[in-house]
Image (tube, rainbow, N blue to C red):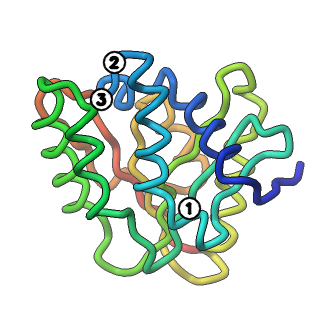
Amino acid sequence: MTQTNASNDAVLYALTLGFSSDPIMRWIYPDPGTYLTAFPQVLRLFGGAAFTGDTAFLSDDHRAAAMWLAPGAHPDDDGLPAPLEATLPEHVLGDAFKMFEAMDKLHPSDPCWHLAFVATDPSARGRGLASALIERGLKRCDADGRIAYLENTNPNNVGLYRRHGFELLGEINVGDAPSRFCMLREPR
């Protein structure tokens, strides 16, 4: 299977479908309409550097996508708060920002490859599409001799990431938010 770099919209569509049942994302956006309109904007702000860095990947069938942030690339921290404040439910907002603060504390201080997002359309899961996109990014990590880092939002995916060499760095529990699992992989 090959993957292609693709249009920004195709990546956003695949990720939006892929995260449609994700525990954290749906805790943040429980209303389906808000999720479908706000989440793509969050993807652009959090992972948009993958588009400019040519590290956003899409499976050939457009059913899975990944956004890798290269060492030195970062989310748009200045742009993120306003749309989150405008779209998150009031009861979620405070805990969401506490969760982001906890994520910042666990993020490696050394430059690393950050798997910001990877997901598969629910109708195409179990075919290895996400694994192929993870492997594509890990080849770059290994070639650079850099660690890979991710913040897993679904406890069902811990095993998937472990199969790719990631180890649990820490678990984030804030308020009534589902757990988030920060994971790290040493280069090979």
Labels 3, 1: front one? 3
The x and y percentages for residue 47 are: 48, 57
- Tell me what residue is drawn at x 22 percent, y 43 percent: 172
Q: Earlier in the sequence, mark 3 or mark 1?
A: 3
The x and y percentages for residue 40 are: 50, 40
- Between the C-alphas of marks 3 and 2, the distance is 6 Å
- Between the C-alphas of marks 1 and 2, the distance is 26 Å
Callout 3 touching callout 2 (CB < 8 Å): yes
Q: Amino acid at mark 3?
A: Ile
- Between the C-alphas of marks 3 and 1, the distance is 22 Å
Q: Amino acid at mark 1?
A: Trp
Specify the label residue 28 is tagged with. 3
Check disc 2: other Cα within 10 Å, few if <14, some if 14-19, many if 20+. Answer: some
Q: Quadrant of residue 85?
A: top left
The x and y percentages for residue 111 are: 40, 80
**Is the C terminus in the top left, top right, bottom left or bottom right quadrant?**
bottom right
Dot 1 corresponds to which residue? 68
Specify the label residue 58 is tagged with. none
Q: Quadrant of residue 154?
A: top left
Check disc 1: other Cα within 10 Å, few if <14, some if 14-19, many if 20+. Answer: many
Check disc 3: other Cα within 10 Å, few if <14, some if 14-19, many if 20+. Answer: many
Q: Which residue is outermost to the right? A: 1
Q: Secondary structure at mark 1?
A: strand
Q: Nearer the viewer, residue 174 or 7?
A: 7
Q: Amino acid at mark 2?
A: Pro
Callout 1 touching callout 2 (CB < 8 Å): no
